[in-house]
Amino acid sequence: MSNQKQILFPPPKSRQKRSQLPNDGQQQRNQQPRRRRRNGQQPSGLFFERDRPKGRGKRFDRWSVPKIWKGNTAFILGGGPTLATVDFDLIKDRRIIAVNNAYGDPVLNAKGKTVGYLPRSWVDVCFFGDARWYGWHKRDLFGFPGLIITCRQELYREDGQVRATMRGRSEGLDPRPDRLAWNRSSGGAAIDLAFHFGVKRIVLLGYDMRRVDDRANWHEDHPAPHKNPYDRFLDPFPAIARDAAEFGLEIINATPNSAIKLFRFMTLEEILADEKVRLAPEAN
């Protein structure tokens, strides 16, 4: 496998730095026709659909997740403390979904306090489900080169900054491509997102679902942390495991001592060695 991943989602011009635009970039942008939303014309862009909620007379846009990773393995980076121990060099050429802060490396000030995040260029997708979190990270996400996805419909942006699905089932895997099962956490919903991408195997990293050395996350706590959300986070996983078995989706937990006991445990090195064997050409 090549160390250079194909860029499936190039950033739109609205997220490029001004220095990356041609000299007449501002003039070109001024000449671009504005997208119209009230006359039935659908905005341009991939995979968007138009829907009209009944009884309200309003329209909104939702994104249908394409099966762009069909048959591949997706590595999902959660927010648990053990994510800090993962050797990312082993998977930088793989398909990566980062949940919340895992999209970037913390930027520290002179006192060692996190003041921002530097986007990781090797992460394919940043997924979040909390509108407050997007407000905290919107500035840093402007430089993220991958795809930003949420199931908070109100955060849809026509400029491509965020692609939004609708929320579907409360638990498990929702087979409808324009909906994501929330599963009571961004980490749980990210599993359904990977399923929609068409993968056959999902590897969970940083899915501790418990405190480790009195830490809730691999990074500094969120500005509004939950004291003990783990029972709520864990409740949907039996439904996820049931639906994964029904759809033929393999989920492997590569998080040491994770509180999620429903999936096979393997180390990251074991998983990569197993995939190398699977991909090796058969001997004549």
Image (spheres, grey):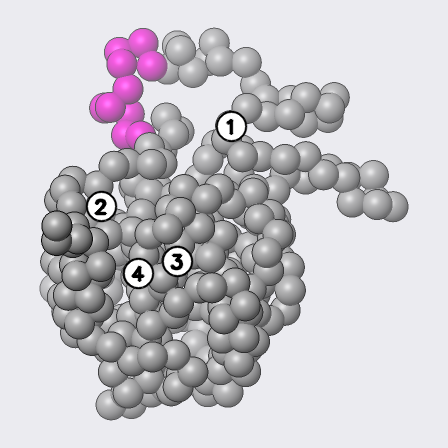
Q: Quadrant of residue 227?
A: bottom left
Tag count: 4
Residue 60 magenta-drawn? no
Inter-mark Cα distance, 3 to 1: 27 Å
The magenta segment? 16-25
The local secondary structure at tag 3 comes to loop
Q: Amino acid at mark 1?
A: Gly
- Give the label on residue 200, or none: 3
Disc 4 crowd, CA 10 A, few/some/many (<14, 14-19, 20+):
many
Q: Mark 4 sits on what residue? A: 75
Q: Quadrant of residue 15?
A: top left
Q: Is residue 143 visible?
A: yes
Query: Residue at point 64% right, 59% down?
Result: 168
Observer-side mark, 4 or 1, equals 4
The image position of residue 273, as x and y in percent, is: 15, 65
Quadrant, the N terminus = top left
2 or 4: tag closer to the N-terminus: 4
Q: Are marks 1 and 2 in contact (CB under 8 Å)?
A: no
Inter-mark Cα distance, 3 to 4: 11 Å
Query: Residue at point 17% right, 61% down?
Result: 277
Q: Mark 1 sits on what residue? A: 45
169 relative to 212, above or below: above
Left or right: residue 199 versus residue 271 is: right
Judged by its main secondary structure, the magenta piece is loop
